[in-house]
Image (cartoon, grey):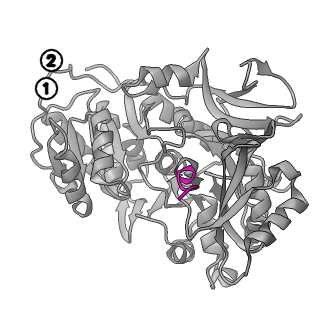
């Protein structure tokens, strides 16, 4: 056997268990798992998979909520050089089957709650892999069916895939982004140098583990550092406030909607938030009024920007600059390099400028599973092309303006939907909003706004259009406003604009 790569994750929990065996690693819905217990569970999973013939390069798919077993399985995969492919429990069997065709796993694992859904999805495949539940992972697993010559048993390497994560599909059909062991090592190292965690921290983890953020923003770093993770299956604002008080949570990661829902709770004003050292927000820009609400409670917010293909962490705005650089996603993390390119010519632009954000560094993914065309489109000349339009100021701070594909041209002028959305969100009657460009015979395209009203605040289309006219150039004011009960979301706090465009004529 060779020795594991320098940047593999397999030893993280075992090393910590030797130092602090009795320290609680995971608080899984009230069940405390010390580091020694978690390490033992990882070893059982690892031994069972190795004995059953699973080898580096194999992929294991899961359908489960956040759980200690899921965490243990990830570290077992890290130890053996396997890749974990966590699928979203929000999807239908039809959607899951399409992703399973891409992932081509050799084993499917589910918890009882989602077993029927996964079985239905697997039943749509011509040659489905065996399907077991987590309870069977430390028992006699089905033997690995090597349809091709069996891979040699070896130690995990830095370049082995560890996570295969399906992107949100905001740019089209969801793709399977591969993150290697080294990618995950470097993104956690960079995050730890910017938003440090120590063994004294208590992390509230609410992001779903079928997203990169569910692993590489705090959870894995916390276990590397010996902290305690309070693991939640899903986000509930009332329960989150209760856990912060009861478990003395010091930090958490969420999207703006999470913090809005918590701030809207009746008991928020009097909740004991004194244990919180900092909270991390991403997925979308943090509205300034919401930022003020949390700062008024004495809680520091660290904002940022990322994408799955980059591990996901790219930009970070320290809490002390939250107001001085309001709306900014910040500066690159350590070990991350960013550049801006002219969207038309592709030429790099220097200094204060606007262009497509390019990223490179050891946390950037090697490509999409089984999709060389998409990989070549994303990775060009040594840079990851994000597709995001970004403004950089003279001090090197970045503002994410929009997806380049979401910009629309009205009467020859480029319009950023996000800019229009921010203007609408400044109205007290608007809770959520999404703006898309739609075809128009005279102007080429015009803006169309979908608005979710804020309960108890009367507002109509005329009032919102007048509100926009006071804040935006005439060509940026939407041509129409439609009120809806909810907005479709692609991932985390990102609105699914592609789905909205199809509803304009509905």
The percent position of residue 345, horizontal first and vertical second, equals: 74, 18
Residue at position x 58%, y 59% in the image: 254
Q: Are the residues at dot 1 and dot 2 in contact (C-beta closer than 8 Å)?
A: yes
**Is residue 156 in sight in this rendering?**
yes
Residue at position x 26%, y 51% in the image: 41
Q: Any magenta on residue 111?
A: no
Q: Which residue is mark 2?
A: 149
Main SS class of the magenta portion in the image: loop
**Is residue 398 in sight in this rendering?**
no
Residue at position x 50%, y 76% in the image: 239
Viewer-side residue, 152 vs 303: 303
The disc at residue 265 is none
> Badge 2, how many Cα within 10 Å: few under 14, some, many 20+?
few
The percent position of residue 486, horizontal first and vertical second, equals: 55, 67
Left or right for 12, reference 133: right
> Badge 1, how many Cα within 10 Å: few under 14, some, many 20+?
few
Quadrant occupied by the N terminus? top left
Q: Secondary structure at mark 1?
A: loop
Q: Which residue is mark 1?
A: 146
Which region shows up in magenta? 499-506
Specify the quadrant of the image occupied by residue 126.
top left
User: In the rendered image of this protein, does residue 70 appear above or below residue 259?
Assistant: above
The percent position of residue 139, horizontal first and vertical second, equals: 12, 49
Specify the quadrant of the image occupied by residue 101.
top left
Viewer-side residue, 23 vs 491: 491
Q: Secondary structure at mark 2?
A: loop
Q: Name the residue at the front extreme.
A: 441
The percent position of residue 228, horizontal first and vertical second, equals: 48, 59
State the separation of the CA atoms marked 1 and 2.
6 Å
Viewer-side residue, 421 vs 330: 421
Residue at position x 75%, y 45% in the image: 416
Left or right for 286, reference 475: left
């Amino acid at each position: 056997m060779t020795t594991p790569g320098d940047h593999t994750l397999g030893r993280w929990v075992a090393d910590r268990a030797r130092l602090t065996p009795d320290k609680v690693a995971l608080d899984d819905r009230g069940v405390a798992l010390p580091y020694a217990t978690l390490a033992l569970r990882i070893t059982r999973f690892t031994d069972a998979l190795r004995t059953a013939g699973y080898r580096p390069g194999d992929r294991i798919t899961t359908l489960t909520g956040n759980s200690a077993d899921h965490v243990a399985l990830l570290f077992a995969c890290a130890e053996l050089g396997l890749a974990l492919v966590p699928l979203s429990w929000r999807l239908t069997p039809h959607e899951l089957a399409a992703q399973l065709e891409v992932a081509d796993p050799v084993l499917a694992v589910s918890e009882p709650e989602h077993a029927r859904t996964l079985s239905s999805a697997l039943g749509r495949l011509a040659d489905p892999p065996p399907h077991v539940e987590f309870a069977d992972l430390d028992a006699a697993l089905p033997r690995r069916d090597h349809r091709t010559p069996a891979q040699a048993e070896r130690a995990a390497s830095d370049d082995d895939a560890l996570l295969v994560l399906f992107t949100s599909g905001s740019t089209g059909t969801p793709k399977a982004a591969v993150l290697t062991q080294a990618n995950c090592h470097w993104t956690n190292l960079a995050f730890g140098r910017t938003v440090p965690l120590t063994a004294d921290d208590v992390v509230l983890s609410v992001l779903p583990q079928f997203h990169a953020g569910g692993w590489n923003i705090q959870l894995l770093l916390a276990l590397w550092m010996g902290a305690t993770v309070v693991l939640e299956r899903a986000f509930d604002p009332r329960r989150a406030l209760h856990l912060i008080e009861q478990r003395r949570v010091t930090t958490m990661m969420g999207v703006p909607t999470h913090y809005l829902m918590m701030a809207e709770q009746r008991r928020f004003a009097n909740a004991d938030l004194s244990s919180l050292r900092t909270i991390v927000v991403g997925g979308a820009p943090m509205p300034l009024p919401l930022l003020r609400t949390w700062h008024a409670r004495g809680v520091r917010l660290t904002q940022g920007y990322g994408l799955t293909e980059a591990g996901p962490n790219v930009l970070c705005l320290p809490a002390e600059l939250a107001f001085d650089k309001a709306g900014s996603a910040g500066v690159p993390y350590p070990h991350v390099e960013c550049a801006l390119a002219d969207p038309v010519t592709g030429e790099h632009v220097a200094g204060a400028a606007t262009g497509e954000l390019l990223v490179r560094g050891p946390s950037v993914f090697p490509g999409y599973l089984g999709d060389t065309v998409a990989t070549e489109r994303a990775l060009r000349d040594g840079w990851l092309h994000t597709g995001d339009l970004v403004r950089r100021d003279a001090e090197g701070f970045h503002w994410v303006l929009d997806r380049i594909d979401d910009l629309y041209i009205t009467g020859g002028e480029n319009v950023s939907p996000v800019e229009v959305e921010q203007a609408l969100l400044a109205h007290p009657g608007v809770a959520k909003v999404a703006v898309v460009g739609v075809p128009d015979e005279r102007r080429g395209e015009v803006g169309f706004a979908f608005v979710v009203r804020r309960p108890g605040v009367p507002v109509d289309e005329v009032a919102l259009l007048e509100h926009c006219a006071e804040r935006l150039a005439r060509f940026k004011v939407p041509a129409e406003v439609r009120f809806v009960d909810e907005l479709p979301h692609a991932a985390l706090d990102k609105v699914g604009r592609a789905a909205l465009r199809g509803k304009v004529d509905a």
